[in-house]
């Protein structure tokens, strides 16, 4: 694998911004949890069982909802960008067929299906599917134009004209 190749879709700066944003979101989630933890300890000391229970439930709700709605989408996208920059990738030069307008969520990341033509071991043509990041813009490729696709599993990490 050529590590000197530059990635046109993702950068280290984008990767570090994602990590910083995730840290900020954890802090936003932690602040009300710490406040509720203080309330819980205080209510346990003065023996207000209903307030202790409410504080525990509040902490649980904040942690579960905060993770599901604020952290998990960033974590999945961060994992995708990390794989794009540092993961094991493969390259293929194939004729471009189409990019779907529909967005699908795969492993927590929004993708659009990109189709290319390929030939199997017996010489028969077939359509090969890749996932292109829905947050990125695809260069203007014409149908049949040769493209160089760098991919990690089925996720496109870089795409250029061949």
Image (cartoon, grey):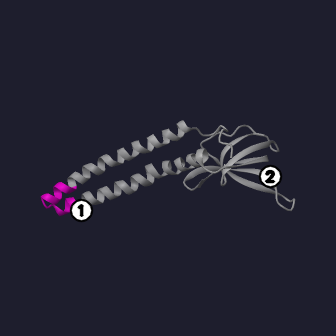
* 87 or 158: nearer the viewer: 87
Tell me which residue sits at (52%, 51%) in the image.
76
Disc number placed over residue 88 in the picture, else none: none
Horizontal relation, residue 127 to residue 51: left or right: right
Q: Position of residue 131 (x, y in %)?
A: 66, 51
Q: Residue furthest right?
A: 123
Alpha carbons under labels 2 and 1: distance apart: 59 Å
Residue sitting at x 75%, y 55%: 128
Report the predominant secondary structure element of the magenta stretch.
helix
Image quadrant assignment for residue 27: top left
In the rendered view, does 80 fall on the left or right side of 8?
A: left
For the residue pair 93 and 98, the one nearer the viewer reads as 93
Which residue is the site of mark 1?
53
Disc on the earlier residue, 2 or 1? 1
- Percent across and percent down for residue 153 are 65, 55
Residue that badge 2 annotates? 117
Q: Residue at x 52, y 47 (%)?
A: 78
- Is residue 101 visible to the viewer in this orientation of the structure? no
Q: Element at badge 2?
A: strand
Q: Is residue 44 magenta?
A: yes
x and y percentages locating residue 79 in the rendered image: 54, 50
Of helix, strand and loop, which one carries label 1?
A: helix
Q: Which residues are magenta?
A: 40-52
Q: Quadrant of residue 11?
A: top right
Callout 2 crowding tier (Cα within 10 Å): few <14, some 14–19, many ≥20: some
């Amino acid at each position: 694998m050529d590590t000197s190749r530059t990635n046109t879709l993702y950068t280290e700066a984008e990767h570090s911004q994602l990590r910083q944003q995730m840290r900020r979101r954890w802090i936003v989630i932690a602040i009300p949890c710490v406040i509720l933890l203080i309330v819980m300890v205080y209510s346990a000391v003065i023996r207000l069982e209903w307030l202790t229970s409410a504080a525990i439930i509040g902490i649980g709700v904040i942690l579960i909802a905060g993770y599901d709605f604020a952290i998990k989408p960033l974590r999945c996208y961060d994992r995708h960008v990390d794989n794009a920059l540092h993961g094991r990738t493969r390259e293929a030069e194939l004729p471009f067929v189409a990019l779907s307008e529909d967005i699908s969520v795969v492993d927590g990341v929004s993708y659009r299906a990109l189709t290319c033509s390929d030939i199997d071991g017996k010489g028969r043509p077939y359509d090969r599917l890749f996932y292109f990041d829905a947050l990125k813009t695809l260069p203007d490729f014409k149908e049949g134009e040769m493209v160089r696709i760098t991919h990690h599993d089925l996720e496109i990490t870089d795409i250029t004209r061949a």
